[in-house]
Image: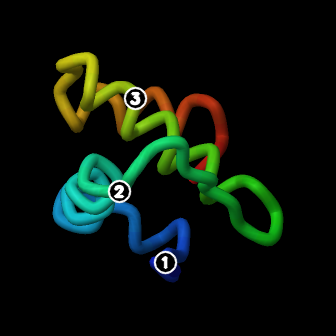
C-alpha cells in the first residue's frame, strides 16, 4: 500500500487517516520514504497517538525533532 505524504501535508486529518490505515493493516508493516524523514514523522505520530497523547502535543514533538 502506498500513501503519498509530503511533510507540509501532515496535519490532524491526514495523520488520522494514516493512523486508521496503519491500525487496520496486518502486522508487521514497513513504513518508509525516500529520505526517512516522513516515515519517521508518521511513525512517531502513530506511536504517540496509540499511546494516548494528544495530536497537537505529538505534532509539536515531531516539529521539535526537526522532522517537519
Residue at figure coordinates x 22%, y 36% from the top left:
55
Dot placed on the residue nearer the N-terminal end, 3 or 2 = 2
SS class, disc 1: loop
Q: Which of these two is toward me, 61 or 27?
A: 27
Dot placed on the residue nearer the N-terminal end, 3 or 1 = 1
The residue under label 1 is 1
The answer to whether mark 3 and mark 1 are in CB contact below 8 A is no
Q: Quadrant of residue 66?
A: top right
Residue at figure coordinates x 25%, y 55% from the top left:
24
Pinpoint residue 5: horizontal percent, then vertical percent.
49, 75
The answer to whether mark 3 and mark 2 are in CB contact below 8 A is no
Residue at figure coordinates x 21%, y 55% from the top left:
20
Dot placed on the residue nearer the N-terminal end, 2 or 1 = 1
Local crowd at mark 2 within 10 Å, few (<14), some, or many (≥20)? few
Relative height, residue 68 to residue 55 (above, below): below
User: Marks 3 and 1, Cα distance to the nearest angstrom?
Assistant: 19 Å
Tell us which disc is closer to us: 3 or 1.
Answer: 1
Pinpoint residue 49: horizontal percent, then vertical percent.
26, 31
- Identify the mark at residue 35; answer none if there is no mark: none
- Identify the mark at residue 25; answer none if there is no mark: 2
Tell us which disc is closer to us: 3 or 2.
Answer: 2
The answer to whether mark 2 and mark 1 are in CB contact below 8 A is yes
Local crowd at mark 1 within 10 Å, few (<14), some, or many (≥20)? few
Q: In the picture provided, is 8 more to the left or to the right than 64? A: left
User: Marks 3 and 2, Cα distance to the nearest angstrom?
Assistant: 15 Å
User: Marks 2 and 1, Cα distance to the nearest angstrom?
Assistant: 9 Å
SS class, disc 2: loop
- Identify the mark at residue 47; answer none if there is no mark: 3
Q: Quadrant of residue 54?
A: top left
Amino acid at each position: 500500500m502506498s500513501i503519498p505524504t509530503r511533510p507540509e501535508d501532515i496535519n490532524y486529518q491526514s495523520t488520522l487517516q494514516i493512523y486508521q490505515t496503519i491500525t487496520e493493516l496486518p502486522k508487521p508493516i514497513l513504513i518508509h520514504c525516500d529520505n526517512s524523514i516522513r516515515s519517521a514523522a508518521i511513525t512517531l505520530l502513530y506511536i504517540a497517538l496509540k499511546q494516548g497523547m494528544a495530536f497537537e502535543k505529538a505534532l509539536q514533538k515531531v516539529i521539535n525533532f526537526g522532522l517537519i
